Amino acid sequence: MHPADASKMAVYKAFNRAIASNSPIDKRLFHDPYATAFLTPSLRLVIWLHRLPLFHRFAYWYIEKLYPGTLTSGAARTRLIDELTVNTIRDHAVNQVVILGAEFDCRAHRLQREESVQFVEVDHPYIQKIKKDILAALPQLPVKPIDYIPMDLRLQLPDEVIPELLLRPHYRTLFIWESVTNSLTGTTGMRMFRYLQGFPAGTRLIFTYVDKGVLENPGIFIGATSMTRLLRKSNDFWSLGISPADIRSFLTSYNMELLEDIGTDEYRRRFFGPRADKMKGYEWYRVAVAVVKAKPEVYDTGYPSTAGGSGQ
């Protein structure tokens, strides 16, 4: 996918966060004060009009009609990952958060936390330049420092681009990999998981993935066909899916333990309550949490290997 096309998808996601942030305070699940800054003038106008009750209802109905579940799933998923991030930092003394494919989300700036944490964003240099330029032009510049590492996640290998200093033993690391795993090829996705398993035991990963079934037969999921068409317009494709039944064994193959695997229906119900019963779409999207396990110890018995037979 061309970087310009990638930036369009990043803008669409920022638009969804702006819509969610524009909801009444007693109903919104999170607040992203930076999302509107990344929008085109026409989308900013929509956000401004969205404050009007009648237009608010129309815009919500129209977007959900075109792409069922986009707004409800996106808002609940963002809130879920926000909570998982804050709780993981607090409960596991995390002091380094690495966001793979951060795009235009500003989680490092908008999350409220007391702990001292270093944030690192890994993303395409084209996306990062746009992001840094827009943030630098804001009247109130975000003060929390971020380390930016330019990398094309689809083409470059992480161990050749990401500095080894991130692996230093004093770091307790959390990786966030949202809305990216599904648009990598199988090969590049596997290389990233292989890279992550090289981090110390206790390193945690919050990531999203799509149900493999949506790649094989989009028609069985509400709204998947229309979303596939939107992705194609932006020269983007779902190319890596995992069956929920296989996610545990998949992670085990990379020396990781599955801690949580949460589907769209579950996290919508968690944050929308009974209203979620009427919300449909995006059931193919899931959020998982994993931890790197201790490396298996290899013991030297002092005896020569008998692999290949006894030799007798």
Image: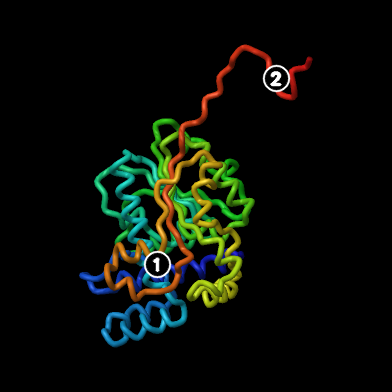
Q: Quadrant of the C terminus?
A: top right
Query: In the picture provided, is 276 more to the left or to the right than 8?
Result: left
Q: For the residue marked with disc 1, what is the amino acid?
A: Gly
- The residue depicted at 58 percent of the width and 16 percent of the height is 300
Query: In the picture provided, is 273 more to the left or to the right than 265?
Result: left
Question: What residue is shown with label 1?
Answer: 74
What is the CA distance from the residue labelled 2 to the residue labelled 1?
Answer: 55 Å
Residue 139 seen in the figure: no
Question: What residue is shown with label 2?
Answer: 306
Query: In the picture provided, is 25 more to the left or to the right than 123?
Result: left
Q: From what the image shows, is residue 268 above or below residue 172? A: below
Q: Secondary structure at mark 2?
A: loop
Extreme right residue here? Answer: 312
**Image location of residue 54, percent across then percent down:** 28, 87
**Image location of residue 80, percent across then percent down:** 34, 58
Residues at discs 2 and 1 in contact (Cβ within 8 Å): no
Q: Nearer the viewer, residue 120 or 233?
A: 233
Extreme top residue here? Answer: 302
Extreme left residue here? Answer: 26
Q: Quadrant of the N terminus?
A: bottom right
**Image location of residue 285, percent across then percent down:** 46, 63
Which of the two discs, 2 and 1, labels the residue nearer the N terminus? Answer: 1
Q: From what the image shows, is residue 145 above or below residue 208? A: above
- The residue depicted at 39 percent of the width and 37 percent of the height is 172
Q: Secondary structure at mark 1?
A: helix
- The residue depicted at 37 percent of the width and 71 percent of the height is 72
**Image location of residue 273, percent across then percent down:** 27, 67
Based on the displayed image, in which of its 4 quarters is residue 5 positioned? Answer: bottom right
Give neighbour class at mark 1: few <14, some 14-19, many 20+ (Cα, 10 Å): some
Q: From what the image shows, is residue 55 above or below residue 24? A: below
Q: For the residue marked with disc 2, what is the amino acid?
A: Thr
